[in-house]
Amino acid sequence: MKRPQTKVQARIEIEKQIDDFLKEGGEVLQVNIGTSGLHNGELNNNSLGFEQPKQPRTPVPGAIAAIEANRQAKLSKNQPKKPKPSRPRKKVVYDDFGEPVRVVWVTE
């Protein structure tokens, strides 16, 4: 059975791949901090979430109560309550002297 690769082995393999890339003439470009966040040379104001106003929150207890009320209304409307069928149970049959004779399954 082949064992899964450990983190150390993966790190060594990635470093080997980087070294091979650089030996073949590959080049790693350095990007200045914040350059990738610029849109046409300016900050993209649409992506900043801190300037937007606070959104109103839904109060949870009221929402849960409404959901439960709808659920109960659907249950009572769709299905009338049915009596649960009784499950069979064991009943021991005794003889005249109080000794058990046999076990019978009874539904009541």
Image (cartoon, rainbow, N blue to C red):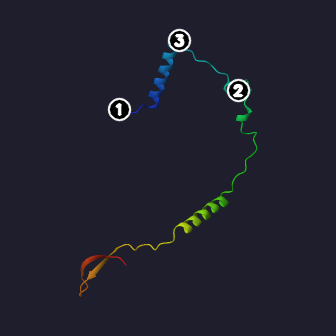
Where disc 2 sits, the SS reads strand
Which residue type carries mark 2? Leu
- Mark 1 and mark 2 lie on one chain; the one further toward the N terminus is 1
- Mark 3 and mark 2 lie on one chain; the one further toward the N terminus is 3
90 w.r.t. 34: above or below? below
Q: Are marks 3 and 2 in contact (CB under 8 Å)?
A: no
Say which quarter of the image contains residue 101: bottom left
Indicate the position of residue 91 as horizontal and vertical percent values: 31, 78
Where disc 1 sits, the SS reads loop
Q: Nearer the viewer, mark 3 or mark 2?
A: 2
Indicate the position of residue 30 as horizontal and vertical percent values: 63, 19
Q: Nearer the viewer, mark 1 or mark 2?
A: 2
Q: Residues within 10 Å of mark 2 (few under 14, many from 20)?
A: few
Which residue type carries mark 3? Gly
Q: Residues within 10 Å of mark 1 (few under 14, many from 20)?
A: few
Q: Residues within 10 Å of mark 3 (few under 14, many from 20)?
A: few
What is the distance, in whole Å, between disc 1 and disc 3 at their CAs?
34 Å
- Mark 1 and mark 3 lie on one chain; the one further toward the N terminus is 1
In this picture, residue 71 sits left or right of residue 103: right
Which residue sits at x=72%, y=31%?
44
Q: Which residue is mark 2?
A: 38
Quadrant holding the N terminus: top left
Q: Which residue is mark 1?
A: 2
Which residue sits at x=71%, y=39%?
49
Where disc 3 sits, the SS reads loop
What is the distance, in whole Å, between disc 3 and disc 2 at their CAs?
30 Å
**Total count of labels:** 3
Q: Which residue is mark 3?
A: 25
Which residue sits at x=27%, y=76%?
103
